[in-house]
Amino acid sequence: MSGPQCKHIGGPWISMVLPMAFSFCFPFPVDAGLVYGRVYNGEGKVQPRLKFTVNGRPVTTDEFGGFGILLPPGNYTVKSADGRTALIQSHPQPIRQDTYFKKHVAS
């Protein structure tokens, strides 16, 4: 007898059930869109494990500099923990936006 069996979970119903399940857990507006992409520094290097905020919500990139966040449509200033900023836009449909943080200039 072999070890535990893993069953494949999927199918067309998953695309309907998951958004409904998340809507009960997180208070997102109906028109919120997914903004996803990668974060780069001013020299074009990927920024893995970078912590930043969007509209006051904390986000951390993955090991490849990738991120994803649901936001109501609009323009947002993204701010890294070290003070660098960037701009992103959200739309009702998913949109990929690679984000480039400018160098932080001390004043």
Image (cartoon, rainbow, N blue to C red):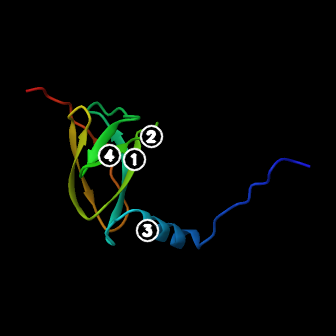
| Residue at which label 4 appears | 58
Q: Is residue 22 left or right of residue 31?
A: right
Q: What element does badge 4 sit on? A: strand
**Quadrant in which residue 30 is drawn:** bottom left
Camera-near label (3 vs 2) is: 3
The residue that mark 1 highlights is 67
User: Which labelled disc corresponds to residue 31?
Assistant: none
Q: Is residue 72 above or below residue 36?
A: below
Discs 2/4, front:
4
Residue in front for this viewpoint, 20 or 73: 20
Label 4 crowding class (10 Å Cα cut-off): few <14, some 14-19, many 20+? few
User: Which amino acid does the dot numbered 4 rest on?
Assistant: Pro
Q: Which residue is mark 3?
A: 24
Using the rendered view, name the quadrant where residue 106 is placed.
Answer: top left
Q: Can you give x and y, in whole percent of width and height, for residue 107 in the image?
A: 7, 27
Which numbered disc, 1 or 4, marks the residue that appears first in the sequence?
4
Closer to the N terminus: mark 3 or mark 2?
3
Most extreme residue toward the top, as rendered? 106
The residue that mark 2 highlights is: 62
Residues 65 and 3: in front is 3
How far separated are the C-alphas under marks 3 and 2?
25 Å
Is 51 left, or right, of 84 in this rendering? Answer: right
Q: Is residue 70 above or below residue 66?
A: below
Amino acid beneath label 1: Phe
Q: Are marks 1 and 2 in contact (CB under 8 Å)?
A: yes
**Amino acid type of the residue that numbered disc 2 sits on in the rendered structure:** Asp
